[in-house]
Image (spheres, rainbow, N blue to C red):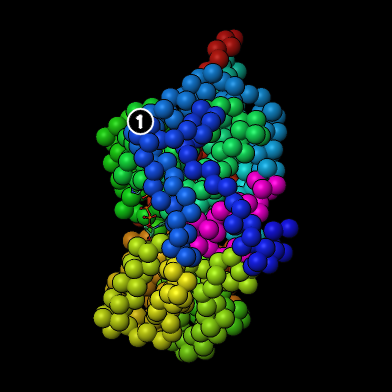
Amino acid sequence: MSAALSLDAWKSQAATLAYRNQAFIGGKYVPAASGKTFDCVNPATGQVLTQVAACDQEDVDRAVKAARAAFEKGTWSRMAGAERKKILQKFADLIDKHSTELALLETLDMGKPIRDSSKIDVPLSAGCIRWYAEAIDKVYDEIAPTGPEAISLIRREPLGVVAAVVPWNFPLLMSSWKIGPALATGNSFILKPAEQSPLTGIRIAELASEAGIPDGVFNVVPGFGETAGQALGRHMDVDCIAFTGSTEVGKYFLKYSGESNMKRVSLECGGKSPNIIMADAPDLDAAATAAAWGIFFNQGEVCNAGSRLIVEESVKDRVLEKVFAVGKKLQPGDPLDPKTGLGAMVDKTQMERVLGYIDAGKKEGAKLVFGGNRVRQEAGGYYIEPTVFDGVSNKMKIAQEEIFGPVLSTITFKDADEAVKIGNDTIYGLAAAVWTKDITKAFKASAALRAGVVWVNCFDNGSITSPFGGFKQSGFGRDKSLHAMEKYTELKATWIHIGN
Ligand code: NDP
């Protein structure tokens, strides 16, 4: 099991790792048509790992052509469900089989602790693909109750060419949330990984092929958002864009769609999730511990991070004390050390962005009560310690904008209505939490919070069986659960005349 490896064992595996660094189009690795590459940097050390193909319009055209041809040929799109299931199950098995390598690639590429990539990212990715594989022959179409003279068959058909543009915070997992349902429903697929973290996406293309996914059905075009991402968004022969990333870029995809072929767009964008702790929480220590993990996990680079701690004034000090205790234990360390709980920020730009927000918080008059600094500079990487602001007003920049770093803003309230009002005072609506043992208060607050996921007396619980996605400017469309299959299919009503 990969999780049992020591720091030295991970380091020696890293030293011998071979990187796949080209695009994967039509069933094989190819360089970018332009021959251009970009540096793929390990954010834990600042060292270049490899040079990756920088795809642009021409490569996207080739990938779309391959994907369309495969779709039309029908080897995958019209394959019997039970067969498609077996192949996707094998794909999931291969991800598990290569879990050590994939966890290593993820950690080296984006700085997250190996403990997380090996125990969370990789197994959940395989599990996600397997879950959709298993769903294939268990989801039925419908017959409408039209009366005896006709039958209307209501069927779901694949869209055709689906492109996923994904971020760097959970590269493999965010991709899998789209790969699973899109492939299970018979589409051809093109993945554009984030420029900061292309390595696992490129590697699994080969595993997909080894599992038996036909050439052209699974393609990967690494490159930049403005080039490869935009070319997919504007392509006249892409039927659907499944996007996870910032709200700003999500809006571009709506524009690209409107200015091209009205392709379907689903958006999983940012968040500024309120984590509301009432004085009558069933276990204040558990609530505070969850609040700390809810913002420090994955270096705070989590779309649903509980970045606003909205806590009842009378218990604030007790809650913060516990948050600091967790923060002290979670100091950044070498991501390859299995004991590390907090790794490096994904790159220098993101680190500077987060430090900029910490400065802005101080300037706006919030009280920095924990952390706030860049650390481990001697390692050459980009580390920020867990950071907590107290005395935050919800109008401040650090309460309104998504920081995407380990920075918690503490806001107090006096009654439940005020807490919900503050919670909803944001452009986002991805997730929210409320902690209280009063069932009436819990139900009223969870109903009033405008968010796609609301946790009661827990934080960040999730399962592939339950949908994930946002309200408001956190986007629309859902990943996970059977509902995700709706995103990648078109409803068709076929009327068959029977007569008298
Ligand atoms: P982006 O939204 O910029 O990137 C997400 C994906 O979109 C990447 O693959 C990116 O490519 C691509 N992209 C970027 N610009 C364009 C464009 N003009 N046209 C088409 N595609 C584009 O997020 P970032 O990775 O830059 O992070 C910035 C902020 O976004 C974060 O600090 C955070 O606030 C938020 N974010 C939210 C996430 C979530 O899960 N909700 C995840 C990641 C980020 P490339 O990487 O090559 O630029």
Magenta segment: does it hold 362?
no
| Residue occupying image coordinates x 53% and y 83% | 328
Q: Position of residue 425 (x, y in %)?
A: 34, 68
Mark 1 Cβ and ligand 1 under 8 Å apart: no
- Residue 489 visible in the picture: no
User: Eyeballing the image, is 445 above or below 97?
Assistant: below
Magenta stretch secondary structure, dominant = helix
- The residue lying toward the viewer, choosing from 475 and 350, is 350
Q: Secondary structure at mark 1?
A: helix
- Residue 498 visible in the picture: yes
- The residue lying toward the viewer, choosing from 388 and 278, is 388
Q: Position of residue 379 (x, y in %)?
A: 47, 71
User: Eyeballing the image, is 201 above or below 57?
Assistant: below
Badge 1 is on which residue? 58
Q: In this picture, which residue range is highlighted in magenta?
A: 95-115
User: Eyeballing the image, is 73 above or below 251?
Assistant: above
- The residue lying toward the viewer, choosing from 190 and 282, is 190
| Residue occupying image coordinates x 51% and y 48% | 199
Amino acid type assigned to the residue bearing label 1 in the image: Glu
Most extreme residue toward the top is 500
| Residue occupying image coordinates x 33% and y 50% | 249
